[in-house]
Amino acid sequence: MDYQKHFRVKPGSRVKLSRMNPAFTGDHKHHKQAADEIEHYRRRLWDLQELLYADHRRSLLICLQGMDAGGKDGTINHVLGAMNPQGCRVVGFKQPSAEELSHDFLWRVHRAAPRRGEVVIFNRSHYEDVLIARVHNLVPKKVWSRRYDAINAFETELLEADVHILKFFLHISKAQQLKRFHQRLEDPAKQWKISEADYKERLFWNDYTAAYEDALSRCSTAAAPWYVIPSDHKWFRNLAVARIVVECLESLKLKFPQPTVDIEHIRREYHTASKE
């Protein structure tokens, strides 16, 4: 299966999430079938991220979005955590600060964009400003409705600076979300992640779905695509994201830079001398 083609939101298409199965696992029936493949892509990510860092001509921005408990943190830990922290950075976007609110909505996002050679992962992203801002009427419709075009222009600007963009919507069912909330309640190591607000937000499930469908439909472009990743099964989510990121990095035809010193001179003068 071509994961990039299968999960990519085709530019200009209209997304209907109810037609996309969040429990889909493709040719794999259970985790054991996919374990070796997941590990292969994790190792490959390490090598490619090092190459991106050394090449220092391009960078990669990965945006993770999804309903609460969709697996953003898990994806970072189990997949993208395979990369070297020296060239990889995670940025979480929560409620804007007073300073951030005094600027345009993309100001804080642009400041967090990756430098050359760097991978940056957005745990939530600039899309919050057409999601939660829309669902909870934080700004008028005439304001958030203009933001889709601003987001597309912003991403085009990044692309022109050789920032490659991958955007993943981690698609879970409402029933699976409730199951994960229950697991958090019962696990002392995860209880800190749960709150009453998580349950209250479930009342807005349909509103969030409509908001996501518009964002995915209006902001998936040929160069900055959205991928809808089935995420009811964590292991398949990890496989799909890892494989797509690897294939993107491989497509960049990255190369180690040529040495800036005379290697033969160093070999003669120092390596030989160290043996004496």
Image (cartoon, rainbow, N blue to C red):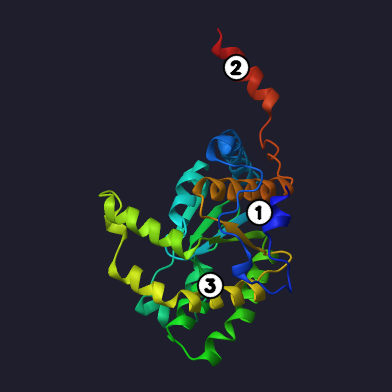
Badge 1: residue crowd in 10 Å (few <14, some 14–19, many ≥20) = many
Question: Relative to residue 70, is residue 241 drawn left or right?
Answer: right
- Image mark for residue 19: none
Q: Which of marks 1 and 2 is in front?
A: 1
Q: Residue at x 34, y 53 (%)?
A: 183
Q: Name the residue under label 2.
A: 271
Residue shown at 67% from the left, 69% from the top: 220
SS type, badge 2:
helix
- Residue 203, given in percent of the width and then of the height, sits at 40, 76
Give how far apart the Cα atoms at labels 1 and 2 are.
Answer: 34 Å
Assess disc 2: are there few (<14), some (14-19) or many (≥20) residues with their C-alpha within 10 Å of its C-alpha: few
Question: Circle 3 sits on which residue?
Answer: 127
| Neighbours of disc 3 within 10 Å: few (<14), some (14-19), many (20+) | many
| Amino acid on which the number 2 mark rests in the picture | His
User: With respect to residue 118, does 159 lie above or below?
Assistant: below
Residue 204 lies, with reference to residue 76, above or below; the image says: below
At a point 59% along the width and 51% down the height, the residue shown is: 241
| Residue named by callout 1 | 58
Name the kind of residue labelled 1 in the image.
Answer: Arg
Describe the element under mark 1 as helix, strand or loop: loop
Can residue 39 be seen here? The reply is: no
Which mark lies nearer to you, 3 or 2? 3
Residue 212 position in % (x across, y down) = 56, 73
Q: How far apart are marks 1 and 3 (CA)?
A: 23 Å
**Residue 233 image point, x, y percent:** 51, 50
Label whose residue precedes the other's in the sequence (1 or 2): 1
